Image: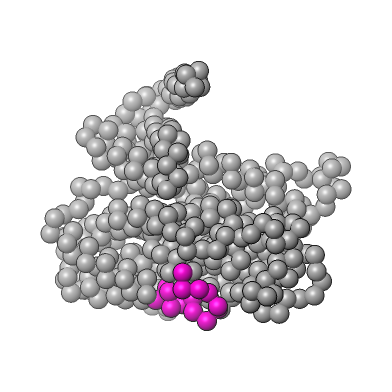
Amino acid sequence: MLRGAALAVLLVMLAFTTLYFVTGEDGGPGGSLFALLALHQAALWAAKAMSPIKQLPPLLTMLVVGFALGNLPFLGEHVGRQVDSNWSAGIRQSALVLILLRAGMALDINALKRLRFVVPRLAAAPCLSEAATAAALASALLDLPVLWAAMLGFVVAAISPAVVVPSLLSLQERGYGVSTGIPSLVVASAPLDDVLSIAGFGICLGLALTEESPVLSALRAPLEILLGLGSGLLGAAVLVLLMPADEDRATKGGPGREERFLSLLGLALTTSFGLGQAGFSGAAALAVLALGAASARGWKEEAKPVVAVVTELWNRLAQPLLFSLVGASVDVRTLESNIVGSGLAILAGGGAVRFAVAAAATSGRGLRCEEKLFTAMAWMPKATVQAAIGGVALDRARTPEERTMGQKLLAVAVLAILLTAPLGAILIQSFGPRLLTKEPEENCEKPEDDQQGRSAAPPATMATADCESAGLQKDKMSL
């Protein structure tokens, strides 16, 4: 153990000294690259140190480390707030692309087919209900005009795929909720929720501060959904056409794991950043999710090595960077005492409405009360979208009055991250194993494939459904 600790210290020291010798002052204390590496290393090693505590998800440790390095005296000035804002935004978006790729490639398509009517309900109803509630409370408590109150409502309504998706994938990998498709339902709905929130925010921002056409503003949400799905599916079709699922070809010099991974990641990053530059940031997450899901379905067995590479890159590089940067982006100096109370009331009221509507949105598909409760619980965390757009209105404000209202929006966004991201991560990890049914391994000869095609069938037919989903029966399952 002592030798391992010494080796870890040596590697960290080599990383910092190499960075300094290669980049100069920017890689030394007080430099932007130094701050970036410090955040990554601190988050990575802190998560490893806390790993024996199973109830504490790694992302929560990383969030806390980033928040501390961004706000504690001396550390905030020399580490957390030294990261270049453009670099931070780009890295956060790149890391989000990686986790959405992983989520898309892990989607249970058969489960989504069964839940195809629940996905849009879960994506739209809680989001719009919380946005309306938060807007009404903001108008009353913060004295905001209608458009600014609506902007605030959409800012706090967006859930965080960066918090929700890794937590749900962790439960899915351990077999929880697979039989009823809960992880796939939540993972597939999350980008749609963000599309609606970002589109709604963009519409209100355009009407309040820019000269965007009202017609374009009204069409933004459906346009971003179609654009996201279309670009993701088109990209996957190109990849599958150029690199088909052909094992013989792969062994004879055809595309291997590296070529598939690099092509998929490059296309995902290009699509995500390209849509953002074109003004359709809401479509970016949906496009990456669709790209990952369609590519995995087209590549079949050859997608598994690609998933392994994506997972490893996420665990070692992207996850520590994403959550430490999100934590560091939270600036407690923006929290004015006279706004905190109103902000808490807005978040509590909107969260209560979201919870109730999310539980109701999953009705009618044979889910147990415990599963509905967990789905509503998993539909609460907020972080990445609030960090990304919380300060946009303040940046674009033109008058002192608008700047004051922009500061109120940013303060409530910061509160949303501080309260819901850590609490939501803890609740998902703690209550998931208690509220969701764990997949029994003896149901089928191929338990690793058991998660595909399960339905909310009666107990008498569940074993048949299990084996059918693994391809051991030819007859279709009766829903």
- The answer to whether residue 445 is above or below residue 469 is above
Residue name at image x 70 percent, y 49 percent: 304
Residue name at image x 33 percent, y 74 percent: 353
Q: Residue furthest bottom?
A: 364
Question: 340 or 150: which is nearer to us?
Answer: 340
Q: Is residue 358 magenta?
A: yes
Residue name at image x 45 percent, y 65 percent: 374
Q: Quadrant of residue 289?
A: bottom right
Would you say 240 lies left or right of 225 here? right
Q: Quadrant of residue 438?
A: bottom right
The picture places residue 252, in percent across and down from the top left corner, at 86, 42
The picture places residue 296, in percent across and down from the top left corner, at 68, 57
Query: Is residue 258 visible to the viewer in this orientation of the structure?
Result: yes
Question: 207 or 454: which is nearer to us?
Answer: 454
Query: Is residue 296 visible to the viewer in this orientation of the structure?
Result: no
Would you say 301 lies left or right of 434 here? right
Q: Residue furthest left?
A: 338
- The answer to whether residue 158 is above or below residue 75 is below
Would you say 192 lies left or right of 131 here? right
Residue name at image x 73 percent, y 61 percent: 444
The picture places residue 336, in percent across and down from the top left corner, at 16, 54
**Where does the magenta region start and end?**
357-370
Q: Is residue 137 magenta?
A: no
The picture places residue 431, in percent across and down from the top left corner, at 43, 59
Q: Quadrant of the C terminus?
A: bottom right
